[in-house]
Amino acid sequence: MPRNETSGFGPHDVTMPQLGMAQDAGRIVSWLKAPGDKVAKGDALFEVETDKATMEVEAQASGYLTHVRAQAGEDVPVGQAIARISESADAAEDDAAPAPAAESDTASDAEDTLPEGREITMPQLGMAQDSGVMVGWLVEPGAQVGADDLLFEVETDKATMEVPAGAEGYLAATLAQKGDDVPVGQVVAIIAAEKPANPVSRALTQAAPAAPSPAPQAAPEPPAAHPADTPAASSVALPASGRILASPKLKRVAQEKGLDLGRLVAAGHPQPYHMRDLEVLENLPADAPAPQPGTTPQAMRLEAVVAQDGFAPFAASVAGTLDDADALLAGLAGASLGAPCIVAIEHVGVPRAFAVPAGRRLSGVTESEDAPGLLLRDLRGSALCGVALGAEDVPVLSVLSKGDGLALVLECDPQHMAPAQAIALLSEFAGRMGDPLRHLL
């Protein structure tokens, strides 16, 4: 289930999340809490429908639901505030909007007056993202753009991506510059219908009268001193090939600080690495020992046989509502790990990665740009009857046809996971592939 907020103190705006890269709006199906209701972090707050799926969205803050601005049936742009979680049920309505005086104070002359047009906001490219770093603009101020033209490049903790304009017109204002860390939902540009005589261009710190909400309270990075709190996607991946799996943001910051990510590998810290691992890297002792050559245990290889393939008929039966068989397969594999993770599905060609949340809701599985912690090779359509490829960057589950049933093979380096964890993973996955309905119980 997607999470809408970041934890912290004080009031929190609830915004329409971006559940897919091509999504620019979502429809409120229903509110699962009424205005004034007490809300706990993790409670299902509302249900949203996109062109891909219908999902429940969790609150990531505790308090009371107030300032509900969108009702069931309304289409809401991504990043737009739709409610607030306040410290009390009777929070004043005028707390929901930023003070208009801020605009008059900051727009000191006519050049600072923003043109009218379509506001472009910092998108939410991942469910845990609360801001993005502006890498650069791909279009000059005043230039004409099409809806599908790439407008700017943004970097999050997980990836660096190019963002399309989403509207036709002229780039009349750019309200953030290279290096600015922009909160999700903050207006970064305005696309006008007419060519502007004097395009506005300024940094985020030069005031933002077009901001849709009060200055957000950015949540700090999760403390790296508690690696046990990180999801299983990080705890199962340690490359055997020597390639380091790390987010673009961490790579950039580490390079700026002169830090070597290889020291995390040498210390046995599990991959992939994110910004939360920066503190661990900075605090590593200077003499962190590297693994000695020749001491790596032999790769593990486990096999299981499923007498009757239950997945194919299950996927066909739910195709009306869950039509992505790869997402279903990723959901069953990820759930077998017992914690949120990223699972890549590979047939022939480029693998597709999926974020598998906690719980048993297969509809909550979404495509992801993150590095996977588990790779599943679907070889059911091939003539292969067995595989023995050795350990790779992450644990690999291979699925092959075997008569009316399936043959399952798990290969991984012992540093990926403990033997007991590997046995549990393959056993759980075999049970789900034989009878997918058990996953829902």
Image (cartoon, rainbow, N blue to C red):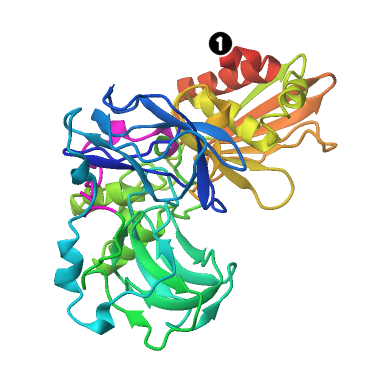
Q: For this rendering, which residue is in front, 199 or 337?
A: 199
Q: In which quarter of the image is residue 309?
A: top right
| Residue 308 colored in magenta in the image | no
Q: Residues within 10 Å of mark 1 (few under 14, many from 20)?
A: few
The residue tagged 1 is: 441
Q: Give the range drawn in magenta.
A: 213-233
On screen, residue 119 above or below 95: below
Q: Which residue is drawn at 45% across and 52% down?
A: 125
Query: Does residue 409 appear in the picture of this structure?
Result: yes
Q: Residue at x 41, y 52 (%)?
A: 158
Q: Quadrant of residue 94?
A: top left
Q: For this rendering, which residue is in front, 8 or 29?
A: 29
| Residue 230 colored in magenta in the image | yes
The percent position of residue 418, horizontal first and vertical second, equals 44, 26
Q: For this rendering, which residue is in front, 84 or 395?
A: 84
The amino acid marked with disc number 1 is Leu
Circle 1 — which element? loop
Query: Does residue 300 appear in the picture of this structure?
Result: no
Q: For this rendering, which residue is in front, 385 or 227?
A: 227
Q: Residue at x 54, y 52 (%)?
A: 21
Q: Magenta region's main secondary structure?
A: loop
On screen, residue 41 above or below 436: below
On screen, residue 8 above or below 78: above
The percent position of residue 362, horizontal first and vertical second, equals 57, 27
329 on left or right of 35: right
279 on left or right of 14: left
Q: Residue furthest bottom?
A: 197
Quadrant assignment for the C terminus: top right
The percent position of residue 144, horizontal first and vertical second, equals 53, 81
The percent position of residue 253, horizontal first and vertical second, equals 29, 63
